[in-house]
Image: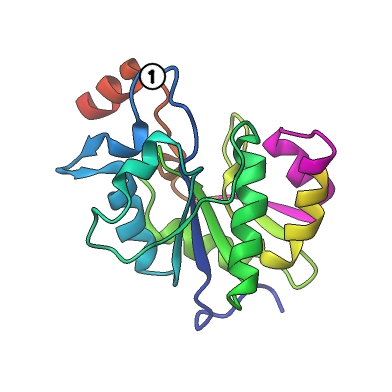
């Protein structure tokens, strides 16, 4: 089995719990083409994934968007503040597994150019013995652009409980397939106002 069949619809986990310190305001609420980034990503992911989860602590800035978008999403607020994206990933995978999903596409809320092609290419690349398939470009690996098996939740929770916060720790302990995707623009993220201005001007 070279990859997951096209009939499999993974869940989607949108990690939105960051403090957006470099941006200076909540990235999930930033508008792109007339809609908040969080809604844009949820809408695009919903074309290939079901259900859609947004993972963010109850007191996060992103949680103010709860119930405001037209795309049906389930909010996961069990993540404890300070656990970082690794904690969000662990809690999101656990929730998806409890709901019966075996796979989950994972992305951050600051990736305005993602497309369903990214999800398709990761699913095809995920081998039977792989725990995860993550995108890579010429600069680095992107663990927040990946497809993960939800069974990995317990292993990642153990990492977090042991004090680990780095997302790359997840791909180090899991059987991870790194995938050079056909469109590196999918992986573009915005961390600061200048990133947003540059991307809008391009």
Please, is residue 130 above or below residue 140 in the view? below
Q: Is 90 part of what is drawn in magenta?
A: no
Farthest front residue? Answer: 59
Q: Is residue 172 left or right of residue 29?
A: right
Q: Is residue 113 left or right of residue 119?
A: left
Q: Quadrant of residue 100?
A: bottom right
Q: Is residue 28 left or right of residue 134?
A: left
Q: Quadrant of residue 130?
A: bottom right
Query: Which SS class for mark 1?
Result: loop
Q: Which residues are magenta?
A: 160-180
Could you tell me which quadrant the C terminus lies in?
top left
Q: Nearer the viewer, residue 114 or 192?
A: 192
Q: Is 171 part of what is drawn in magenta?
A: yes
Q: Is residue 112 visible?
A: no
Residue 200 rendering spot, x and y as whole percentages: 22, 28
The residue lying at 80 percent from left, 33 percent from top is 163
Q: Which residue is mark 1?
A: 192
The local crowd at label 1, few if under 14, some if 14 to 19, many if 20 or more residues have their Cα within 10 Å, is some
Residue 2 rendering spot, x and y as whole percentages: 69, 74
The residue lying at 75 percent from left, 53 percent from top is 176
């Amino acid at each position: 089995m070279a990859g997951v069949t096209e009939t499999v619809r993974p869940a989607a986990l949108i990690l939105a719990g960051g403090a957006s310190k470099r941006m200076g305001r909540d990235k999930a609420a930033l508008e792109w083409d007339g809609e908040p980034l969080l809604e844009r990503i949820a809408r695009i992911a919903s074309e290939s994934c079901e259900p859609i989860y947004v993972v963010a602590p109850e007191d996060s800035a992103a949680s103010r968007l709860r119930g405001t978008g037209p795309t049906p999403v389930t909010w996961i607020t069990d993540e404890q503040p300070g656990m970082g994206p690794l904690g969000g990933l662990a809690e999101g995978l656990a929730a998806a597994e409890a709901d019966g999903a075996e796979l989950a596409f994972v992305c951050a809320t600051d990736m305005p150019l993602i497309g369903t092609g990214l999800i398709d290419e990761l699913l095809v690349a995920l081998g039977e013995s792989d725990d995860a398939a993550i995108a890579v470009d010429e600069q680095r690996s992107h663990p927040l652009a990946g497809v993960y098996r939800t069974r990995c939740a317990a292993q990642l929770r153990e990492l977090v409980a042991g004090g680990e916060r780095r997302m790359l720790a997840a791909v180090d302990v899991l059987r991870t397939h790194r995938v050079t995707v056909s469109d590196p623009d999918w992986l573009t993220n915005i961390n600061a106002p200048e990133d947003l201005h540059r991307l809008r001007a391009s």
